[in-house]
Every structure is written in structure tokens, then in C-alpha cells.
Image (tube, helix red, strand yellow):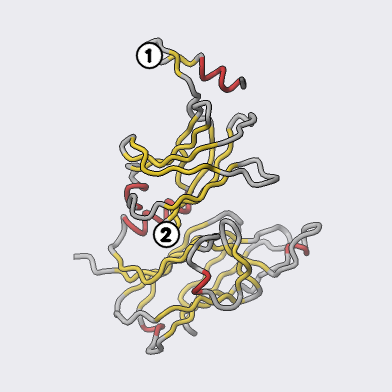
Amino acid sequence: MTIRTLFGLFNLNRRGRTQTGLPNAFIGSFELRVNRIVGWVRDKYDSDVLDVQIEVLRGGVQIAACPAIMPPGQRRFEFNLPVEGLFTSAELVKEEVIVIARDREGNHAQIRLDGAAQIELIRDHLGAPAVSVFDLDFSIGGNARHFLGCGWSGTEADFTWTEDDDSFINFDTPTEPGVYALRMTAGAIVHIPAVPEQHLLVFINETQIAQIVYNQAHVQFHECKFTHEPFGNEVQTALRLHHPNAMRPSDFKPAGDGRRLAFNFKRISLTRLLPVT
């Protein structure tokens, strides 16, 4: 029996009964990726936990569950759970739906929304009403690959890297006039002094609609708004992401990656904002 379990067994509730299982026993985070929740969890006490169950609860009732898996060589568990139609994003933001990690000894903790993902969902569902044009998930099992042109590396477990100086996304041109919002969630290669910042220039066809500077590597959420004019009259539109500071990790890390990388994208969505009445 682990020390952590002993703590749980001797944790008495207000009525004097023995409470098995230690609360707040895990740390981690998750994101909503179109129709799945994807995340990670780690044992807070670094004990030898062999298995972790992820549970999605609404009003205390379990509506979905899956085992979390520890990849070889890792010290944390990862999970990927389909949840299409089970709840809304607004319910997640309001914590009407929560995600719990639990091991076989009853030790447990609530897992929180990732900070960038939380901002993303707030913009999606608590901001101006909008109509989705596309919503792309760049992780394994996601839906982004069909839309990607050149300038992308292979899909990894949680994201897809941009490669070289330009990365393209191709999609059917929306025909409705109005104001559009491009929302992007991504991290970047930032390594001082080799790569102190990454510049991201965003083009719809040949019109620049945004310029973003990352001076930290962590995942961030950005939104840029623009009118319909850059789409033009073509049937297909090219979204071009220009990242001229792409670097090879092998240039500043021993036995590093030889690809020219800049940004690791998790999600990109395009919506048409509806007038607020």
C-alpha cells in the first residue's frame, strides 16, 4: 500500500467515517478538439500508479469514460476521448461538465481546461454568435490533414508542426459577406539566443490579415478579424501562414531535429460573425 493511499484511508469526513481515496491526487489539463477531449494527467505524489481512468461528469453523473495511457518513456498519462454530442463547449466553460482522473485506489482529482483552450472556448461560445466555416484539429485522429497543403510536417500525438517558411490550408471559399474571425491555438520554437522570437504572418490568398509575434514557446490563443473582400471570387481559398524564423532544432540542441520548424498548431477555426441584435 502506498503512502498516498494510507493518507486517504485516514482522511475522515465530517461524520467520522473513513474516506478511501485521496482528493487532488493528480495534476494535468485537457482541451476540447472539435469532437474529442485530449489531455494529460500526472500523479501529484510521484508514486507508482499503474492505471488511471478519465471520467466526464454532468451533475455528478458519468456520461463518458476512457483509460489514460502512459506512453513508453513518459512520466505522465495521456488520454483521447470521443465526446461528440455528449455536451456543449459552453457547459465546459461554465464547469457544468467536469473531467475527473481516478486510479484503482480511489485517489482522484478534477482536471482543468488548458488556459489557451479556455480562452478559445470563451471566444467560441460566450462571445458574438457565429457560423463555423471550418474547425480543424491538428492532432492524431483529427480532421486537419485533408485541408493541408505544403509546408506541414507529419501529424504528431497532440499537434502538427509547420515546416520551412510557408504552410498552406486550402478550403472552399465562403460566399456570405460579413466579418470573419480566424482563431488559432499554437505553440512555437523559441530558444534564446538562437531563436528569441517567432513571427507569424497570416494571409488570405494574397492579402495579409495579421502579424503575430511569439516570444515565448507555450501554447497561445490568437484571434484576427477581417472582412470578406480577401476571399475574392475564386472557388477555393488559400490560407498562408508565413513563418520566416523557422529553425532546425539540431542547430541549437545536441542530436536535435533536422526539420526547419516554427509553430506547432493544435487548432485553427474560421467563423463568420453574426450581427448582434
What is the three-letter code of the residue carrying label 2? Val
Q: Which residue: 35% across, 68% down?
A: 132
Residue 238 rendering spot, x and y as whole percentages = 48, 81
As drawn, the residue found furthest toward the top would be 16
Where is residue 169 drawn, in percent x and y?
A: 51, 75
Mark closer to the observer (2, 1): 2
Q: CA distance from mark 2 to mark 1?
A: 42 Å
Binning the other alpha carbons within 10 Å of mark 1 as few (below 14), some (14 to 19) or many (20 upward) gives: few
Question: SS at mark 2?
Answer: loop
- In depth, the one of 246 and 58 nearer the eye is 58
Earlier sequence position, callout 2 versus callout 1: 1
Instruction: Residue at 65% x, 59% y: name it.
Output: 190
Say which residue appears at 44% left-offset and 42% top-offset: 65
Farthest residue toward the bottom? 233
210 left or right of 273 in image = right
Q: Which secondary structure lies at badge 1?
A: loop
> Would residue 223 be found to the left or right of residue 28 on screen?
left
Q: Which residue position is annotated with label 1?
A: 14
- 10 Å crowding of disc 2: few (<14), some (14-19), many (20+): some
Three-letter residue code for mark 1: Arg
Q: Position of residue 144 (x, y in %)?
A: 50, 68
Rendered-image quadrant of the N terminus? top right
Residue 60: x percent and y percent?
34, 34
Quadrant including the C terminus: bottom left
Residue for point 59% across, 62% down: 264
Q: Which residue is mark 2?
A: 34
Picture layout, residue 29 above or below residue 131: above
